[in-house]
Amino acid sequence: MGMGRALAVALVGLHGHVIEVEADIGQTLPAFVLLGLPDAALNEARERIRSASQNSGVPLSRRKITVNLVPASLPKKGSGFDLAIVMAALNAAGDVRGTGSTVFLAELGLDGRLRPVRGVLPAVLAGIAAGCQEFVVAQANLAEAELVAGAKVRGYGSLAQVAADFDADPTQLVFVPWEPCGTAGGGAQRVVPADGKAGKAPLADLSEVAGQGEARLALEIAAAGGHHLMMVGPPGSGKTMLAERLPGLLPDLTNEEALEVTAIHSLDTLADGITALVRRPPYEHPHHSASTAAIIGGGSGIPRPGAASRAHRGVLFLDEAPEFDKRVLDSLRQPLESGELVLHRAAGTAAYPARFQLVLAANPCPCGKATGKGIACECTAMARRRYFGKLSGPLLDRVDIQLQVNRVQLSQLSDTGQRETSAQVAARVQTARAIQAQRLRPFGLVHNADLTGRILRGPLRLSGKDTLLLDRAMGAGTLSARGYDRVLRLAWTVADLQGRDTPGADDVGLALTLRQRGEGL
């Protein structure tokens, strides 16, 4: 009897800490003590482990087993430590060997089956960063774990199979046949597609949108520069259709971006079916009744990611934006600037990336009839003020494009002429993004939406003649300093789409129009 060791990973947000699992078998009465700040789910591992090891033919020692999770000061949560704990305990009893340098990530069933856990991808990434190379996961998590370059991953269906590969006596083992389990994580299995098409409906195409030439242009500019967009218009004017087609204009994610996005989806309760990197920009469309925790993240214990983080590198669409709680909307102000959400809770602090494109849609008034002369509108002035009062000035100041979307005319709806497809527009977006990426590489930036005031008034400063309209708007008090910079960002994107080296007065004028078209509504 002696000491046994194995490795596991504790996730705090997307950041993982390699945990050394120490097991000691004492010479006293039977007991199982688990140390190292385990949560309730982890404390229950003691009973799962005893039953699983007994039913796998490698019963735990009948003496006192003390398991310590190092560092002991870091809170541990979840069932992903089950396999590491039982392997450390069996190593201490001499039933298995060579577990000290292997990271084990799996939950145990009472019959000894290995069940998948969430967060395997970020856990393997953390292990690789800490210098670990050997990983053991449940068979259902194998494809996900193998997405990490440099990781030597083995997938198993049962504890007996794992024990056999670590020199357990094969004559004593009871092998349980592995069966795919679609209920890990508390719900039905969901496969996260690699291309945005597998397992879901095809991406909506821009050619299906009738009319709305100005809105289509605004959508193209938003996609090319990574700009935030707000559309205000009557019901049925096509705001939702346009927003749903924005992801189809965005290019595929790079390898680094895809790994980052897939790691966030790996933390999703139902994301135990990840078999490939998410290559298409994600699209999140939460209902207007969503809480602050649902949008930015939260929950009990270590905060979990919300819709804003799941939309990282993609689109977050808030339809009927004024119907959202004002606190929910204002909570987006910080990630719109920093691209990151840092959530502080009593149990710990978690940081999640949240660099998304925000798309807001709103009616002109609560009843939606305040268009044209607004004769049919039944809303009072107070009701209209209260309706748009949910959208605070600081939030709207961060939205680059503020567009009024008009009702589609019958002639436009009946027009059967050839409309541009998403693929045609996406090609121009790709070209514009390549131009700006090359220009911004010396500054460590990728999109025009990331440009800072220091750069816009320094190396990329425009002449006073080109910014005359902009200077007048700011002098008249209709544009803030932040809005001034955002119009300049838009102007650079317009120039990139036109293939010009620098924006001219016309580009600045168009950018200013797109910025101020929605004002006063």
Image (cartoon, rainbow, N blue to C red):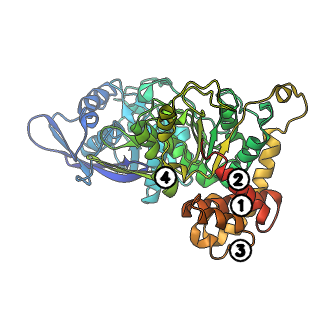
Quarter of the rendering occupied by the N terminus: top left
Residues under labels 4 and 3: Cα distance?
A: 27 Å
The answer to the question of whether label 4 and label 3 lie on touching residues, with beta carbons closer than 8 A, is no
User: How crowded is the residue under tag 3: few (<14 C-alpha within 10 Å), some, or many (20+)?
Assistant: few
Amino acid marked by disc 4 = Pro
Q: Circle 1 sits in a helix, a strand or a loop, which is it?
A: helix
Q: Which residue is mark 4?
A: 394
Disc 2 marks which residue? 513
Residue at 74% from the left image edge and 69% from the top image edge: 466
Find numbered disc 4 in the image and state the secondary structure of the residue it sits on: helix
- Discs 3, 2 touching: Cβ within 8 Å: no
Disc 2 packing (10 Å; few <14; some 14–19; many ≥20): some
Q: Nearer the viewer, residue 77 or 168?
A: 77
Farthest-out residue, right: 417
Q: What residue appears at the point 36 percent right and 43 percent down from the top-left corner?
A: 303
Residue 461 in the image: x percent, y percent? Answer: 67, 74
